Image (cartoon, coloured by chain):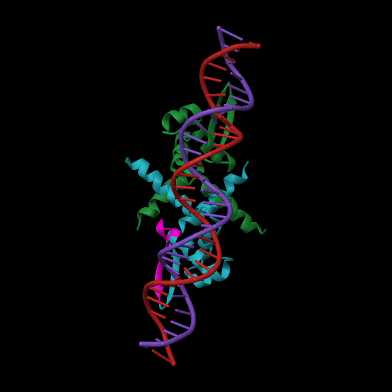
Chain colours: A green, B cyan, C red, D purple
Amino acid sequence: MSDSVQQREISANFFKALSHSTRLFIVEQLSDGEKCVCELTDMIDADMSTVSRHLAVLKNVGIVSSCKRGNQVFYSLRTPCILSFLQCIHAPLGQG
Amino acid sequence: MSDSVQQREISANFFKALSHSTRLFIVEQLSDGEKCVCELTDMIDADMSTVSRHLAVLKNVGIVSSCKRGNQVFYSLRTPCILSFLQCIHAPLGQG
DNA sequence: CATCTATTTGTATACTTAGCCAAATAGACA
DNA sequence: TGTCTATTTGGCTAAGTATACAAATAGATG
């Protein structure tokens, strides 16, 4: 498989991870600093197991990383450059 | 629905449109200038109906626009800023 | 060690997406 | 008008995704 094909698959998976509003919400929340699953669950209208699965999706593509302390798992944003993406998207989409 | 909730849905749909390697390929091809469906179909190992549906997905979220001339439909990139996204993604993902 | 809290994973269900083939549509042009 | 080419849409199937609930796991603490 050529480099560019492989790169497109990586990018596609990256975008797929961001293609759910709950996961975008999580990314936004983590831009303030790390949060544990239970804190995020308090903010999201979904079962903790669902939130955990969303976090796993983000982690799989490298958008967040996790760190266990005590019996809590803290997630943090590994690629803050996503935040500038988000701002960048809004502008062009609004233009037409 | 609050503005930010709505904005997240828009962004999520935008990312969803980019979350398929065939569609990323199309975006790359269109960065060179407009192409008709048949040209794209020649480059992609899929039925023309499939390519047409991918183009419709991109058009729905405003990533491409279309223009009919004769009996051909030409698609072009409306948000070239996606190309800088793509470059931007690769860097952070490679970092760990 | 028993048990409590936080998290993840198994499983089932409902929904969505991708793909193909075939049929419909639309323009060009004899 | 009839027909050819380009494109889109209908309908189906297979595969993937989101979600909840329940069960399993792991650390903390009595």
Residue B77: x %, y % from top left = 45, 63
Residue B62 belongs to the span the image colors magenta: yes
In which quadrant is the C terminus of chain A drawn? Answer: bottom left
Please determine whether, in this image, residue A13 is positioned above or below residue B59: above
**In-image side of C19 versus A2 (left or right):** left
* Front residue (pair D9, A35): D9
Residue shown at 57% from the left, 45% from the top: B92
Mark yes or no: residue A32 visible: no
Rendered image quadrant of residue B47: bottom right
Please determine whether, in this image, residue A72 is positioned above or below residue C18: above
Mark yes or no: residue A10 visible: yes
In which quadrant is the N terminus of chain A drawn? Answer: bottom right
Residue B29: x %, y % from top left = 53, 65
Residue B52 belongs to the span the image colors magenta: no
Residue A71: x %, y % from top left = 57, 22
Q: Total number of numbered labels?
A: 0
Residue shown at 58% from the left, 48% from the top: B91
The boundaries of the magenta stretch are: B57-69
